[in-house]
Amino acid sequence: MSRVRLYLSNDTSSCAAGAERLAEAWRQRSDVELVRTSSRGAFFLEPMVERDSSDGRLAWCHATADDLPKILAGDGGIPVSSIPFLSKQTRHAFATFGVTEPLSLEAYRAYGGCAGFRKARQMSPSAIIEEIKTSRLRGRGGAAFPVWKKWEVAATTAADRKYVVANADEGDAGTYCDRMVMEGDPFRLIEGLLICARAIGAEAGYIYCRQEYPVAAACLRAAIRAASEAGWLESDGQPFPIEVVSGAGAGSYVCGEETALLESLEGRRGVVRARPPHPAQSGLYGRPTIVSNVLTFATIPNILARGGAWHASMGTEGSRGTAVLQLGGRVKQPGLIEVPFGLTLRQVLDQFGQGMADGARLKAVQVGGPLGSLFTDAQLDIPICFDAFAKADAILGHGGIVVFDNETDMLELSRHLMAFVADESCGKCVPCRIGSLRAREILETVQRGQATEADLSLLTELGDTMKAASLCGLGARAPYPVLSALEHFPVEFRNRMRS
Amino acid sequence: METFLPNALDDLLIRARPAQGAPPNILRVLHAVHDLCGYIDPRAIPAIAHSQGATEANVAGVLSYYPSLNTQPAGRHRIQVCLGESCLANRCVRVVEAIQSKLGIELGQTTPDGQFTLEPVSCVGNCAVSPGVRIDGELNGRVRPSDVAGLLDRYR
Ligand SMILES: Cc1cc2nc3c(=O)[nH]c(=O)nc-3n(C[C@H](O)[C@H](O)[C@H](O)COP(=O)(O)O)c2cc1C
Ligand code: SF4
C-alpha cells in the first residue's frame, strides 16, 4: 500500500494544542508516513496537518484524529499559501518553519543553510564584522545594542581565550520565538555561533537554556551532535565545542540579564555584575565574551549569505531587518509574526491578530514582557521600531505582545507584575530590592481598601527612584507597567482607596 | 556524614570534583544532585562544599538563590501552572482555582498522599495556546477549568 506523507509540527506549543495526540493516533498506520516538522507559528490553527499537492502544501486546521479519511482523500485542505496570517509576513529567520524537519542537516542545507558560515570562512574576522556593521543589526534580546560594536570590542581585546554565549533564557512572559528557533531550526543558532566565534576568535560556545524548555535543550544537543559528526563544528581549523547548559537558571528571571547569566554559568548566585567592564571585554571567567540572544544569532547566517546591505534594506531608519513578534493574550489569532520593522502596533493587531477573541473588548496591550509599558487603544498607532518605543518610554524588548481584555483587573495585574519583580530581584542594589517590595506592599494596601492618596504619591516616587537608580533593567523598568496602569486606569486604583 | 549519603550521591560528588586547574561550579553540582534525588537534602551541603573546595555558606547561598532547587522531596507528579501574562489574560487564575479545589492544596504545596505537587511557573513559552499546564513534562494548552478533572485523573 502506498503511504501518504503527512506533515505535523513537533513544536512544544503545537503538541500542547493537540499535535501529539494526532501523532499517537496515526503513528502505527500503514497508510501514513508522518513527518514531524517545525511549526509555522500560526498557533491559532494548530493542530494543523499538511500534505503535498500541486498547489504546494495543503493544510487541515484544527484537525482531529477522525479527520484522517478526509485528509487521505485530499478533501477540504486549504493551500498554506492562501492563509493570510502567513502570506502577509516577510519570513527570513523563520522562512523554513513548518517546512523542514528540525534535525535534518540535509534539509537545513537544501534550504540555504550553512551558506553564511561558508562565506564567513572565506572572510577575515574584520571583514565579517564589517558585514555585520553594514547590516545595522541590533540585538534582539531587549537592549537593542548594535551587534557589530560588541563583536569588535571582543575581537580587539587581547586574551588567551574568548567565548560565545547564546542567551536562551527567554524569560519575558509572552515570548517564545527563541524556543521555536531552538526546537525548530537549531542548526541556524549553531551557525550563528560559529560565525561569531570566527569573527572574535572564540574557542568555545555555550547555550544557556532555561529549564522551562526541556525539549529545546534536547533538540540543541541532538543538533550539536549531528553538526559535529558532519565535521561542521570547527573554527579556524580547530574543533569548536558548544555546550548546552540547560536549566542552570532554575527559574530565575534575572539570570537572563547577561552578567547574572555569566555568574550563573560559573556556578554562583545569579547576581548582576556592575559594568564596566562589559562582557565583551571581560565576561565568562574574565575573558572577552559575546553574550547575545538566540534570535540575534539566528539572524546572522542570512546576513552573511545575502550580505549586510540586504538586511539593511529592510525596516526603518534605526531598526533594520525584520521584527519577530509573538502575539498572545485575548486576540483571535495568536502566533509568531515576522515582518519588517515599521508596521504600527494597531496594524499588527488588526492584520494578524484579527481583533479580539469572541466577546472580548480590548483594554490594554503590554509589549516587551513583564517590564514593558502598557498601551491603551488610543496609543496603538505607534510604529514597531526601537526608536519610536524608546521615545514613548516603552520597550520592544524581545517582541512579546500580550493583549488584555475588558475583564482584566489592572490593579491586580500591577500587583502581579510588581510581586514578580520583588521575587526576582537579585538583591544587589537597594532601589530595586527594597523599592519593589515596598511598591508591592502599597499595591496590596490599595487592594485591601486601606490606601490613601499619600500612598499613591509614594508609589510614583518609588517608581521614579527605581527608574533612576537601579543597577540593571529589572529595577529600572519595573515601575513602567505599574505607573502606566495607574496613569491610564486611575479609576481602578482610586475606587479602592480609603474614603 | 558518609552514613546518610546514598552511594549514588557519593559517586556523583567524587566525579563532580573539578579537574586539575578547572574552576569549581557549585550550581552545576547542585543541579546534578537535584536531578539524581529530585531535591537537595540540606544535609548534603557539607559534602557538596567539600567536592568543590567551597565553603558550606557558599553552597547554601547558591542553593537558596535559585527558586526551583527544592530542599524537600516533591510529590510523585509535578503540576506546573503557567502564570505568564498571556495565560493571565486568558484566565489561568480560574484554572489554578479548579486545580486547587480538586486537590485541596495551594500553590507550592504537595497533596498529603504525596501524589501531586502544584507549582507556579512564570512562563513556559506556550503563550499562543494559553493557558498552559505542564504535568510531569507533558504540556497541555488552552486548558479550561472544566478540563482539569479529566487531566488530573490521567495521573491517578
Ligand atoms: C532582568 C533582565 C532579564 C533579561 N533576560 C533576557 C533573556 O531572557 N534573554 C535575552 O536574550 N536577553 C535578556 N536580557 C538582556 C541581556 O542582558 C542582554 O542584553 C542580551 O542577552 C544581549 O543580547 P543581544 O545583544 O543579542 O540582544 C535581560 C536583561 C535584563 C535586565
Ligand atoms: S536592579 Fe534589581 S535585579 Fe538589577 S542589579 Fe539591582 S537588585 Fe539586582
Image (cartoon, helix red, strand yellow):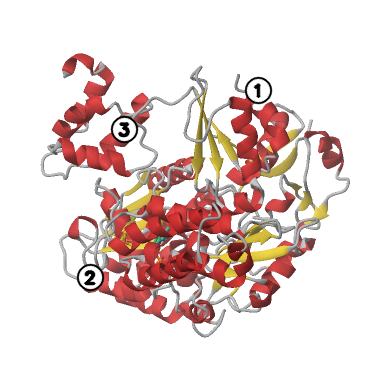
Query: Would residue A197 be visible to someone looking at this image?
Result: no
Under circle 3, the secondary element is helix
Mark 3 vs mark 2: in front? 2
Chain hosting mark 3: B
Spatial separation of the CA atoms under disc 3 and disc 2: 33 Å
- Kind of residue at disc 3: Ala
State the SS at label 1: helix
* Foreground residue among B20 and A447: A447
Pointer 3: what residue?
Answer: B32
Instruction: Please name the residue that numbered disc 1 is placed on.
Output: B153
Q: From the viewer's perspective, is A149 left or right of B102?
A: left
Q: Which residue is mark 2?
A: A276
Return the x and y of residue A136 as percentages of the image width and height: 44, 79
B3 or A499: which is nearer to us? A499
Quadrant of picture, ligand 2: bottom left
Q: Amino acid at mark 2?
A: Pro
Residue A471 badge: none
Q: CA distance from mark 1 to mark 3?
A: 31 Å
Tell me the amino acid under the disc marked 1. Answer: Asp
Q: Chain of mark 2?
A: A
Q: Residue at x 22, y 73 (%)?
A: A156
Q: Between disc 1 and disc 3, whose residue precedes?
A: 3
Is the residue marked 3 within 8 Å of ligand 1, measured from its CB? no
Q: Where does residue A328 sit, x and y in percent of width and height?
A: 64, 57
Label 1 packing within 10 angstroms: few (<14), some (14-19), many (20+): few
